[in-house]
């Protein structure tokens, strides 16, 4: 059975956010054409459920040097795409809250709208998307019952869906995001998006109105860390403590 193209993404990752933004500029209906699969560091209960399925989590934490580079790189890439970026500072984040909430939104047919609400809150306003109250507010903003979406973290059926997503990532050898698969082709990272598009777009009936893949002209800044909270710059491992992306 032929499978749809897949995109493993995470609300934790700035590179995932940027990749989906670029993808949707080329393919506005990408979330209808590509299977989006959430990927996040599981909590203790989810990790135990993975072990019971014979699965694990491939992601490896990064060094301070890589963390500082990614802070600069993400800021530069966002500016190049004309995006405003605000740096969230997460303390003890519980990543099941936004990712299972998104799975529930998908079940209710509101996944694209809720995805946009979550990423705008996190990456453009610097808000804590692991806060259940914020999840309620964002869900209500796109026409859903906030209590239902915030409560997905404790819903057995939604948690089972989450386990299935992480098991699929393990079995698919996913070690970071964004990670795109199309048939036998694999593409890891924002800088491989054009490679994915080169094999994906020919499979579509592309209208003349759909633009060609491109990167906006990169902006420059006198201080590449300007605007990044000092807590992130000075804390060793801060990237994996708060805005880690699993991009690698």
Image (cartoon, helix red, strand yellow):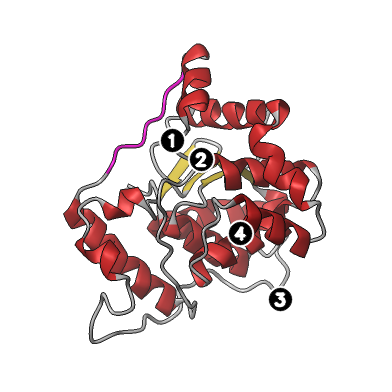
Q: Which residue is mark 3?
A: 209
Q: Which residue is mark 2?
A: 39
Q: Nearer the viewer, mark 3 or mark 4?
A: 4
Do callouts 1 and 3 mark residues in contact (Cβ within 8 Å)?
no
Upstream in sequence: badge 2 or badge 3: 2
User: Disc 2 versus disc 1: distance between alpha carbons?
Assistant: 9 Å
User: Disc 4 versus disc 2: distance between alpha carbons?
Assistant: 15 Å
Q: Which residue is mark 1?
A: 174
Residue 174 x/y as whole percent? 43, 35
Upstream in sequence: badge 3 or badge 4: 4
Looking at the rendered structure, the secondary structure element under dot 2 is loop
Q: Residue at x 50, y 35 (%)?
A: 184
Residue 127 x/y as whole percent? 52, 64
Q: Nearer the viewer, mark 1 or mark 4?
A: 4
Relative to 35, is 236 on the left or the right? left
Residue 183 quadrant: top right
* Up/down of 232 relative to 162, above or below: below
For residue 106, say whether it is visible. no
């Amino acid at each position: 059975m032929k499978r749809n193209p897949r995109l493993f993404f995470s609300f934790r990752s700035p590179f995932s956010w940027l990749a989906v933004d670029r993808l949707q500029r080329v393919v506005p209906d990408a979330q209808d054409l590509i299977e989006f699969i959430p990927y996040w560091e599981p909590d203790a209960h989810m990790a135990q459920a993975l072990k019971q399925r014979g699965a694990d989590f491939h992601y490896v934490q990064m060094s301070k040097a890589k963390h500082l580079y990614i802070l600069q790189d993400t800021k530069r890439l966002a500016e190049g795409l004309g995006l405003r970026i605000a740096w969230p500072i997460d303390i003890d984040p519980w990543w099941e809250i936004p990712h299972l909430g998104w799975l529930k939104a998908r079940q209710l047919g509101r996944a694209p709208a809720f995805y946009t609400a979550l990423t705008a809150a996190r990456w453009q306003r610097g808000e804590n998307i692991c806060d259940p109250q914020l999840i309620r507010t964002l869900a209500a903003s796109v026409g859903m019952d906030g209590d239902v979406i915030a409560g997905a973290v404790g819903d057995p059926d939604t948690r089972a869906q989450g386990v299935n997503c992480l098991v699929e990532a393990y079995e698919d050898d996913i070690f970071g995001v964004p990670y795109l698969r199309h048939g036998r082709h694999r593409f890891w990272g924002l800088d491989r998006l054009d490679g994915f598009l080169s094999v994906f777009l020919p499979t579509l009936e592309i209208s003349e109105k759909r633009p060609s893949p491109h990167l906006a002209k990169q902006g420059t800044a006198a201080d590449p860390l300007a605007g990044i909270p000092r807590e992130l710059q000075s804390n060793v491992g801060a990237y994996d403590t708060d805005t880690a992306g699993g991009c690698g």
